[in-house]
Amino acid sequence: MKLLIIFIYLITANLGYALDKPNIKNLVLIKKPIAYEEVIFKDKNQKNMNLSNYKGKLIVLNFWATWCAPCREEMPSLDNLQSNEKLNNLIVLPINIGQENILKSEAFFKELNIKNLNIYFDPTVMLAKKFSLRGVPTSIIFNKEGKEFARIIGSIDFNDEEFINWLKNFN
């Protein structure tokens, strides 16, 4: 009887976990959230920014480049995600890892009519190495404690209601 109860618990616990995850094929959940030391990047004025300054917020760290076609495609929906009223404790930090200058990045944002996001840079590509990125776009999602709990490898539509409703659980 005890084994049956344990078996039923394990099945329902795993089923609940699976039901909570939105149906996005390139969303990877991290079962044991990962903490990182010294996640430093630059703002458009070359000032150092530290991810630890955003603790207490749900964070989407999006790595992109102006030459990346999927980045171009997803950036407007990422801009909408930042201004989504359902996610008032969310901060989106788009980090250009293309080693491009500010003017090229600003032109990219202007062309796509990006109004809710700031431009950040990883000029030495150290963060790309730290997070073992395999390509762009890649979005890393951090919980309020500043730990990575999910990762999106490739592009998605950040306007997806199922994804937004899932994110609300962590907001």
Image (spheres, grey):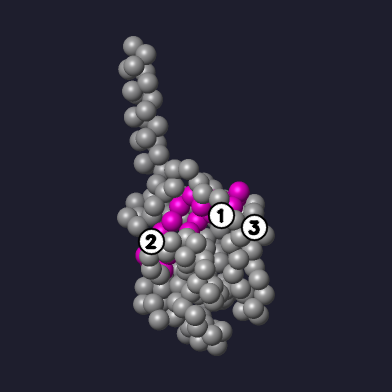
**Which mark is in front, 2 or 1?**
1
Residue type at mark 1 is Tyr
Mark toward the start of the polypeptide (2 vs 1): 1
What is the magenta range? 137-157
Residue type at mark 3 is Ser
Q: Which residue is mark 3?
A: 52
Does 92 sit above or below residue 120?
Answer: above
Along the horizontal axis of the image, is 67 left or right of 45?
left
- Which residue is painted at 61% across and 60% down in the image? 38
**x and y percent of residue 171 in the render?**
57, 51
Q: Secondary structure at mark 2?
A: strand
Mark toward the start of the polypeptide (3 vs 2): 3
Q: Which residue is mark 2?
A: 153
- Which residue is painted at 32% across and 17% down in the image? 4
Mark toward the start of the polypeptide (3 vs 1): 1
Label total for image: 3
Question: Residue 55 or 134: which is nearer the viewer?
Answer: 134
- Which residue is painted at 38% across and 25% down in the image? 9
Q: Which mark is residue 36?
A: 1
